[in-house]
Structure formats: structure tokens, C-alpha cells
Amino acid sequence: MVAMTRPRISARISAISESATLAVDARAKAMKAAGRPVIGFGAGEPDFPTPDYIVEAAVEASRNPRFHKYTPAGGLPELKQAIADKTLRDSGFQVDASQVLVTNGGKQAVYEAFATLLDPGDEVIVIAPYWTTYPEAIRLAGGVQVDVVTDETTGYLATVEQLEEKLTDRTKVLLFVSPSNPTGAVYTPAQVEEIGRWALDKGLWVVTDEIYEHLVYGDAVFSSIATAVPELRERVVVLNGVAKTYAMTGWRVGWLIGPSDVVKAATNLQSHATSNVANVSQAAALAAVTGDLSAVAQMREAFDRRRQTIVRMLNEIPGVLCPEPLGAFYAYPSVKALLGKELRGRRPQTSAELAELILEEAEVALVPGEAFGTPGYFRLSYALGDDDLAEGVSRVAKLLGEAR
């Protein structure tokens, strides 16, 4: 018998990294289960329960024999229509129900968008810091990620000039995210239009992730690039879902909106990958997107309060600089000034090493900037209770105050 010498795992899948945010969250939960009082700022997950009327819709759907069977791979027809109606209501972008694909969470929408648009070698301009899943989806599709790096001096906003510098004859897609995970950056309507016009002029596709559309604060406003530049209609793919807006992370319902040929191709892919999204979850999502936004307003008010608290507390720590996030529910402070300093007998040289030290010594879980393409930073989700937030940042402040 000839010994097998080929790798057990394909190179394509071996190259995938574990989700850093989920890994940090899992470790924090494991430490808590072992009796340690860990406070986790890792997962981007609202601490609120799903609103009751949405849960009741799911309970009712589970009793309906129609939902015990397969339904169309692309989504329940009534949910696709409701998503089209909701998109017009919330962003002014008018689409037909046939241009909607209901996916198993926002992550499947991300994956299917890039799998549908990219051929090997196609380049995607990605503004860093970026969410951890984007690079993996691009790489799996054979694409090449080209980073435009932003920092705290500009509030993590990219300019057209920076985008232009990265343009090549291989560029096919611009990934545009506002409000941003992990920074909370929100582009103004004028900036959104300027970037959209640039993409249009260069003949690029735009993939825009709008899952935080309802979570903006202060004077910031959400602006969809699909609406700001209507001429992009045939080259824009909109990604969204119910997870963040309605506290439905576990229900796994997202969607992809785009030109008919793209949606049809992505639906074909999904028909082989997963078939339809769980029908009970789709019924819950239908109740969410057709309901009013009062529950969202209550959550946003709490997030806003926590946002102001966390930014103030972080900026009071010597060596930490945190721009004000205007959207989502993340703070993204720079800790570059603390790297290399002595702390509890160690000298962490990277934000990853510093995050590890903070977890061990202060029992606070943070996600280091390495996970988002920009070392020297932390991402802290403020979608957790007010008391835990204050206690967690206080622990970090006390520990980092010892740095010399």
C-alpha cells in the first residue's frame, strides 16, 4: 500500500484563520465558566434579547406545516418583498424582490458576494481596519486584497486620493463599509457620494455592507452608496441583515441585494451550499423588517450612552487615544504609545501581546488590532451592560496605569 503523501487538509481551507473576535469571546466565556470574573469586549453582539413580537412570530411559524418543508433557496417570497420594501424605506434604494437573496446570516452574504464577483487574481480594495471575515471570503474566492490603511488621525476615514493610489488594471471591486466594524467610522453623505462617483468613473463594482445602518449617533447620518450614486445600480451589491439592528445574532438571517444576474448566480451557489435559510428564522426576520423601529431606537439610546462612557474612560488612560466612533457599537483606541513599556514584569511589543497580558492580569478580553489589519490598536465592543463596561475599562485603566 502506497503511503498518502498529500496534505490532509486542502491549501485553500488551511489558509483560513479562525475568527479572532469569536475566538476571544469563546476564551472569555470559558474562563468565566471556570470561575474567573472575566469581562468580555470581544463579540459584536447586542446584550438585549430579541424583541418579543419577533419571537412570537417565530413560535407561530414553528406550528405552520408549510415551514416544516423546503422553501425556495433564495428566500421566502414574502420576506424578499419585505426586504425590498424595507430597503426603500430605510435607504431610498428601490429594488425588486427578485434582486434579493436571503442568506444564512450576513457572513454567507459576504462570502457569496465575493464568490460570485471574483475570478482568481481579481483585486479588491479594502479599507483597513476591516472586519475579520472580509479577507477570508476574498481569499476563498481567489481574489487579492489590497489594503488602504487609515488611522486615528482621520477618524479612520479613507479619501479618494488613497483609493486612487491602490487602483490597478486588476482592480474589480471596492469594499465600502459605513458605519464601520471595527472602528465605528461613518462617512458623511458628501464623502459617500464622492467615493461612489470615483468607483463609477473607474468602472468598479462596489460591495457595501450596511448592517449597522440604524446605529449612528450624534449628528452622523447613514448614507447608502447605492442611493448616493444611482448610476452604480448595475455595479453595486448591498449586504445587510437583522443581527445587529434587532438583536438577532443567533437567528442567522442576512441578505444580498444586487443586479438580477448577480443575485441569480449567488442563489444558484446557495442552492447547493445550504438550500433555504431556516424557515422559522425567516418568519422572525419578516416580523422584524415589517415592524416599526421603536425597539431599535431604545437599543440605540443605550448604545449611545455606553459609547460616550467608553470613549471618555479610554481617553483618560495615559498612552491610549480613542477617536469618537459615530456608528455601530465599537471603540477602536490606539495603544501604540504603550507598546514596549514595562508592565507586570513584561514588555509587550505588539497589541496582541498586550491584549494577552490584559486578559491574564485584569481578566478583561479585548480583540487586538492585528485581527483587523492594523496592529497597535484594540477593538472594544460596547454592546454589553453599563456596569460591566465601566468595571471592565476601569480594570484596564488600573493595569495600564502601571506601565513604565
Image (cartoon, rainbow, N blue to C red):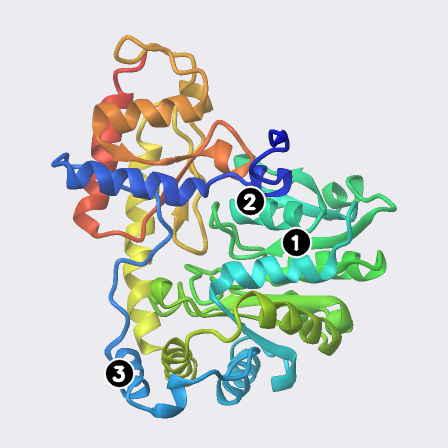
The answer to which of marks 1 and 3 sits earlier in the sequence is 3
Residue 124: x percent and y percent?
72, 48
Left or right position of 268 against 275? right
At mark 3, the secondary structure is helix
Residue 49: x percent and y percent?
24, 66
Q: Which of 323 and 357 lies nearest the eye of the viewer?
A: 357
- Which residue position holds label 1? 175
Left or right position of 192 against 49? right
* Residue 174 can be seen, yes or no: yes
The answer to which of marks 2 and 3 sits earlier in the sequence is 3
Q: Which amino acid does label 3 sit on?
A: Val
Q: Which amino acid does label 1 sit on?
A: Leu
* Residue 224 can be seen, yes or no: no
Q: Are marks 2 and 3 in contact (CB under 8 Å)?
A: no
Choose mark 2 or mark 3, whichever is in front. 3
Q: Which mark is residue 365?
A: none
Label 2 environment density (alpha carbons within 10 Å; few <14, some 14–19, many ≥20): many
Q: Which of 120 and 53 lies nearest the eye of the viewer?
A: 120
At mark 1, the secondary structure is strand
- Which residue position holds label 3? 59
Between the C-alphas of marks 2 and 1, the distance is 10 Å
At mark 2, the secondary structure is loop
Q: Which amino acid does label 2 sit on?
A: Tyr
Residue 376: x percent and y percent?
48, 27
For image coordinates 28% across by 46% down, the residue present is: 309
- Which residue position holds label 2? 130
Left or right position of 166 against 21? right
Label 1 environment density (alpha carbons within 10 Å; few <14, some 14–19, many ≥20): some
Q: Are marks 2 and 1 in contact (CB under 8 Å)?
A: yes
